[in-house]
Every structure is written in C-alpha cells, then in structure tokens.
Amino acid sequence: MSLARAYRDQGRYELAIGQYQAVVRASPGYAAAIMALDETRGDSDIDESRSDQARQEYRRALSMAVSDDDRKRLERKLRK
C-alpha cells in the first residue's frame, strides 16, 4: 500500500490504481485498500475533469472509511 500511496501523492494515479488493485486482489476484504482505491479513482477523475464520476468514487470510498480522519477528508472532497 505504501507504493500505491506514494504514486497517488505524486499524482501518478494510474500507477497507484494498479497497485491498489493488486492489494485488493490479494486481500479482497481489506477495507482500507478498497477505500484507498476508490478515493484514488476519484482523484484521477477530478484530474481528468470528471467530477460526477469522482463524486461516485468518493461516496463509495466514504462508505468504506474506517477512521474519522478518512471520513472528514472524503467529506471535504465531496463538498468541492
């Protein structure tokens, strides 16, 4: 997950998405990885000016959020 996070932080969303997908395939019930994958897809959609799609991804990520910090960050992204 740290490599995926690093790619996401660099704005290299497609590489991050690929890494998160590999983690989810290896651990299908890993909520943090699923949430991060959906959030990264949303970030990528924003970068590509697909705000409606991004909102869907952020909502899906929010439904998987396990911490208050995650929820607050995703709620901020949804308000934008």
Image (tube, grey):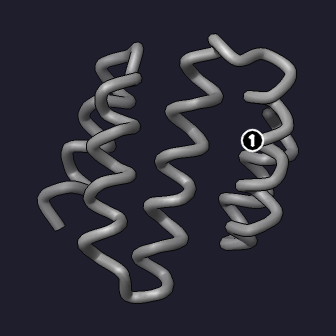
Give the vertical position of 44 relative to 75 (above or below).
below
Residue 10 picture quarter: bottom right
Callout 1 amino acid? Tyr
Residue located 38% across and 23% down the image: 65
Residue 37 is left or right of residue 51, and the answer is right
Q: x%, y% of residue 73?
A: 32, 42
Residue located 74% across and 68% down the image: 14
Residue located 50% across and 33% down the image: 35
Residue 12 is left or right of residue 40, and the answer is right
Q: x%, y% of residue 58?
A: 34, 49
Residue 9 is left or right of residue 70, and the answer is right
Q: x%, y% of residue 49?
A: 38, 88
Q: Which residue is mark 1?
A: 20
Say which element carries label 1.
helix
| Number of other residues with Cα within 10 Å of mark 1, as a class: few under 14, some 14 to 19, many 20 or more | many
Q: x%, y% of residue 34?
A: 58, 30
The quadrant of the image that shows the N terminus is top right
Give the vertical position of 15 relative to 60 (above or below).
below
Q: Residue furthest bottom?
A: 49
Q: Residue furthest left?
A: 79
Residue 79 picture quarter: bottom left
Residue located 67% across and 60% down the image: 9
> Looking at the image, how many numbered discs can be counted on the residues?
1
The quadrant of the image that shows the C terminus is bottom left
